[in-house]
Image (tube, rainbow, N blue to C red):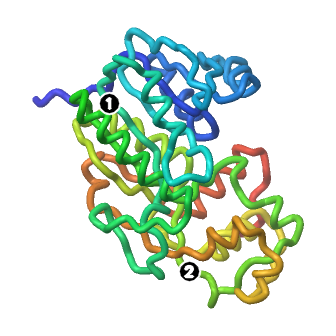
């Protein structure tokens, strides 16, 4: 009988431990050691209160630091820094690792690297064409991580991740305020994934000798308007008013408009290599689970 693959047994280093990292750390602690690096002292203190070993470390200052001696995996979750097309924050962090040689490096990127395809499907073989600075920084970061791993003979995995939702990451406040959304005819397809499915994919990739780029989504490329309508129905909140793209220019924030301007259908030809499938392939199931974890009721009939 073939022995199942084993995940790295030493310390998992979660660099930039925020929303996703916190849930990944709790999952990892069931089976092995973890160290969470947080940008702010208050964030590190919050992790420590939950029993998660944590350290406040500002990658932008790049202070002297010694990685764990049993470091087996680096999971990099920190966002890029600054307006440039290069991710200098990541570059400084790689320098801080010194001579460390983990078994694997997992970098969390974004599906934004594909740019706006007008709804045309993309997979891991599709060219990158980032339209925003943050996405350009992600392309730069992917290349930096790949080179760093090649130079050291390490396994490199890049997760291209869409919008993340889950407990406390639902548009409930926007719905309660009655903020408008684009009407259906002006809303292009989007992609998302539940935070716990993202955690599960990260655990899965560290159990298998795979490397390279993986797109991760729940497989339902619906618009932000359609997803928000799902949330409203399940939470028992009024459906938001709908506006045209022209009306949105004077109402919605520049950041949200930039997000809505891009549309694509993200698919994956490689996800089967992980031995992983999302638990929440139906977004309604993921929304229900999130509301329940938050202690909120599900609307009658939903």
Across and down, in percent, residue 205 comes to 33, 39
Q: Residue at x 58, y 29 (%)?
A: 59
Q: Is residue 11 left or right of residue 259?
A: left
Q: Which residue is mark 2?
A: 188
Q: Nearer the viewer, residue 100 or 234?
A: 100
Residue drawn at (49%, 48%) of the image: 86
Position of 204 relative to 69 (above/below): below
> Which of the two labelled residues, at mark 2 and mark 1, occupies the earlier sequence position?
1
Q: Residue furthest top?
A: 69
Q: Nearer the viewer, residue 279 or 104?
A: 104
Residue drawn at x 59%, y 16% is: 53
Q: Secondary structure at mark 1?
A: strand
Q: Is residue 53 above or below residue 222?
A: above
Residue 177: percent from the left, percent from the top?
A: 89, 66
Q: Is residue 197 left or right of residue 229?
A: left
Disc 2 vs disc 1: Cβ atoms closer than 8 Å?
no
Q: Position of residue 289 (x, y in %)?
A: 63, 51
Q: How many marks?
A: 2
Q: Which mark is residue 240?
A: none
Circle 2: element type: loop
Q: Name the residue at the front extreme.
A: 84
How far from the left and from the top, in percent, is residue 266? 42, 67
Give me the disc on residue 104: 1
């Amino acid at each position: 009988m073939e022995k199942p693959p084993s995940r790295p047994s030493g310390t998992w280093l979660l660099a930039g431990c925020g929303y996703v990292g916190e849930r990944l750390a709790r999952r990892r602690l069931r089976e092995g050691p973890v160290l969470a690096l947080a940008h702010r002292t208050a964030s590190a203190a919050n992790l420590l209160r939950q029993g998660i070993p944590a350290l406040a470390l500002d990658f932008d200052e790049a202070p002297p630091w010694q990685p764990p001696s049993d470091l087996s995996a680096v999971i990099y979750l920190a966002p890029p820094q600054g307006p440039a097309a290069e991710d200098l924050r990541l570059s400084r962090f790689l320098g801080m690792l010194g001579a460390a040689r983990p078994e694997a490096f997992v970098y969390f990127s974004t599906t934004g690297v594909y740019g706006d395809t007008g709804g045309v499907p993309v997979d891991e073989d599709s060219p990158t064409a980032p339209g925003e600075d943050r996405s350009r920084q992600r392309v730069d970061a992917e290349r930096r991580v790949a080179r760093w791993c090649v130079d050291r003979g390490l396994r490199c995995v890049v997760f291209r991740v869409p919008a993340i939702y889950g407990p406390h990451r639902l548009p409930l406040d926007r719905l309660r305020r009655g903020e408008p959304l684009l009407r259906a005819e002006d809303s292009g397809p989007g992609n998302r994934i539940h935070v716990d499915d993202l955690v599960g994919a990260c655990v899965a990739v560290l159990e298998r000798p795979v490397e390279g780029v993986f797109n991760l989504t729940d497989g339902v490329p619906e618009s932000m308007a359609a997803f928000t309508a799902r949330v409203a129905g399940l939470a028992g909140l009024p459906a938001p008013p709908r506006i045209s793209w022209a009306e949105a220019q004077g109402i919605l924030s520049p950041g949200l408009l930039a997000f809505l301007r891009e549309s694509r259908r993200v698919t994956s030809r490689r996800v089967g290599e992980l031995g992983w499938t999302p638990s929440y392939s139906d977004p309604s199931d993921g929304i229900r689970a999130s509301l329940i974890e938050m202690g909120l009721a599900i609307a009658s009939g939903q």
